[in-house]
Image (cartoon, rainbow, N blue to C red):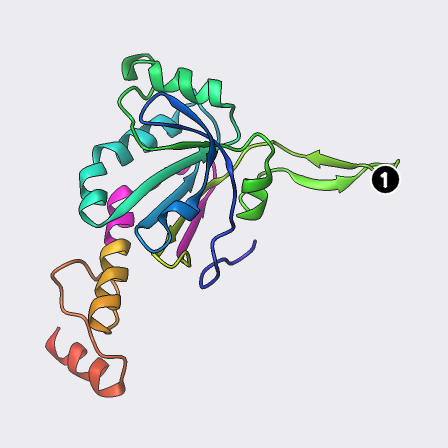
Amino acid sequence: MSVLVGKKAPKFNAKAVINGGEIVENFSLDQFVGKKYVVFFFYPADFTFVCPTELIAFEEKSTEFASRNTVIIGASTDSEFSHWKWLQTPQKQGGIEGVKYPLVVDQSLNISKDYDVLIGTDEYDEEGNVVLVGEPKAYRGLFLIDKQGIVRHQLVNDLPLGRNVDEVLRLIDALQFTEEHGEVCPANWKKGDKALQATQEGIASYLSEK
């Protein structure tokens, strides 16, 4: 798997459904560079089982992400029409009605390939043609991208394993703290905890005060 941490987030222009029901043609992460932090996450498919719990959980914490100057963006290999229908379906019927952040369309599979979260892989058949072997779906990949468009954290879960939204918020807090204070965040750090200087004296002081 590709490690994207420390590198520019792969660029794309794609269809997306925004604001819970508006289809746009050319959605891009470029609009946030220099302005916002981005949590860009992939999920396997609309109208599944673990996926709605994740997408709704992100929406329920949307004000907390906004307070951290961070936007949430989801993506899957479904069509814009599938995204739209799922967004219109009540939650009690397996839908995600009420989700307002953008859902990107990756029917070409190129975005999932660029972020290296596609389940299927390209191989050659006997005639030398490129064919996809495996499912045309994405694993549960998540990428925290800073305001310069650099990936600072990535996580990829297998299909049955849902993600922890509070942990994503903790990582944003840690990133923003280190950017502001120039200190580093030790194990299990959370907002309000003591950090440390990246020196031998700093770690000695931190451990002595625990």
Q: Report if residue 154 lies within the magenta region.
A: yes
Q: Is residue 203 above or below residue 171?
A: below
Given residues 174 and 12, the one toward you in this image is 12
Residue 91 % position (x, y): 29, 17
Q: Quadrant of residue 146?
A: bottom left
Residue 160 visible here: no
Q: Is residue 105 above or below residue 119?
A: above
User: Which SS class for mark 1?
Assistant: loop
Residue at the (32%, 22%) spot, across then down: 96
Given residues 177 and 161, the one toward you in this image is 177
Disc 1 marks which amino acid? Gly
Residue 10 visible here: yes
Left-right relation of 115 to 144: right
Q: Quadrant of residue 136?
A: top right
Given residues 109 and 31, the one toward you in this image is 31
**Residue at label 1?**
128
Residue at the (53%, 44%) spot, across then down: 117
Query: Furthest-right residue in view?
Result: 127
Residue 8 % position (x, y): 48, 58
Residue 116 % position (x, y): 56, 47
Q: Report if residue 62 lies within the magenta region.
A: no
Residue 54 % position (x, y): 33, 33
Residue at the (47%, 19%) spot, across then down: 82
Magenta part of the chain: 152-170
Q: Is residue 209 above or below residue 106?
A: below
